[in-house]
Amino acid sequence: MQTYPKGHPIPYAPTEEIDIYPDSDGEPMAASDLHRDQLIWTLQTLESHFSPQPDVYISGDILMYYEKGVPRRVVAPDVLVVFGLGRGPRRTYKVWEEGKTPDFVMEFSSESTYQNDLSGKRELYAELDIQDYFLYDAEGLYLPSPLMGFQLVEGVYVEVPVGAVGGLHSPVLNLDFHVEDEGLGIYDPVAREWLQTPAETAETRAEVAETRAEQAEAEAARLREQLARLQARS
């Protein structure tokens, strides 16, 4: 048995998979408040939209290991969407265990990430056969365009053209991404509606209910006034 001198550090060999594939890289989730808010909004909106489909897994900033036995082969997409998987929580995403790479990835570019987003990550995601790769620059300072999209065609990313109404269509998600005055917007061309977070949906419903109540009260007041005039004439 090998021995080590007193005070000499003993080499450590991890014995559990969680040691080999950690679930955190110590990096912050977002570069600014705006960046963070837009990222959280996007995740919540996509989760709400796909909630009727239990086989759609959506996550953000999760470490994705893409080569078994090589922990350094890891990337953490800001947003990933995978079809055909269960929705259960995961500490990490191991491609060899899940059986596939994500179908859609989106990166929220910042001053420290945009160059890698446009080059290294773009090449990597193409190699991993990720069909749609979108980038969003919340500050509008770093990318050539605040919103960019790429679709994989024969192993090469081809830039998604701007649509007739100004958005970028994701064929995989069948959704249109737009840059609005208030930030990112996502449109469902099938339902012909803008997607919302659950909180926004509840707020919209409350506003609609309030408007209908006001309209009903106004109509009731009109009828009361009309009835009073008729009674006055008789």
Image (cartoon, grey):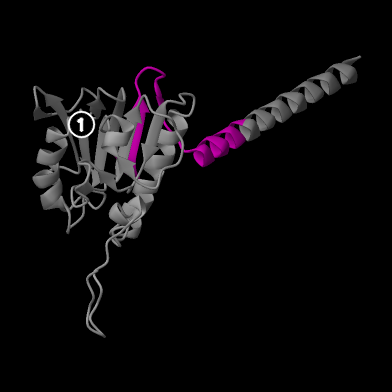
The quadrant of the image that shows the C terminus is top right
Crowding around mark 1 (Cα neighbors within 10 Å: few <14, some 14 to 19, many 20+) is: many
Q: Nearer the viewer, residue 129 or 172?
A: 129
The x, y position of residue 39, in whole percent, is 34, 47
Task: Give above or below for 9 relative to 230.
Answer: below
Which residue lies most toward the bottom here? 6
Residue at 30% x, 51% y: name it.
21
Left or right, residue 175 beside residue 156: right
SS assignment at label 1:
loop
Residue designated by label 1: 130
Left or right, residue 203 beside residue 189: right
The x, y position of residue 7, in whole percent, is 26, 85
Q: Which picture quadrant has residue 152? A: top left
Task: Give above or below for 151 relative to 111.
Answer: above
Left or right, residue 15 beside residue 223: left
Q: Which residues are magenta?
A: 180-208
Which residue lies most toward the top here? 234
Q: Is residue 154 visible?
A: yes
The x, y position of residue 188, in whole percent, is 37, 24
Task: Give above or below for 171 relative to 89.
Answer: above
- 2 is within the stretch colored magenta: no
The quadrant of the image that shows the N terminus is bottom left
Task: Give above or below for 170 relative to 4.
Answer: above
The x, y position of residue 61, in whole percent, is 32, 49
- 195 is within the stretch colored magenta: yes
Residue at 48% x, 29% y: name it.
51
Q: Nearer the viewer, residue 153 or 223?
A: 153
Tell me the kind of residue under disc 1.
Ile
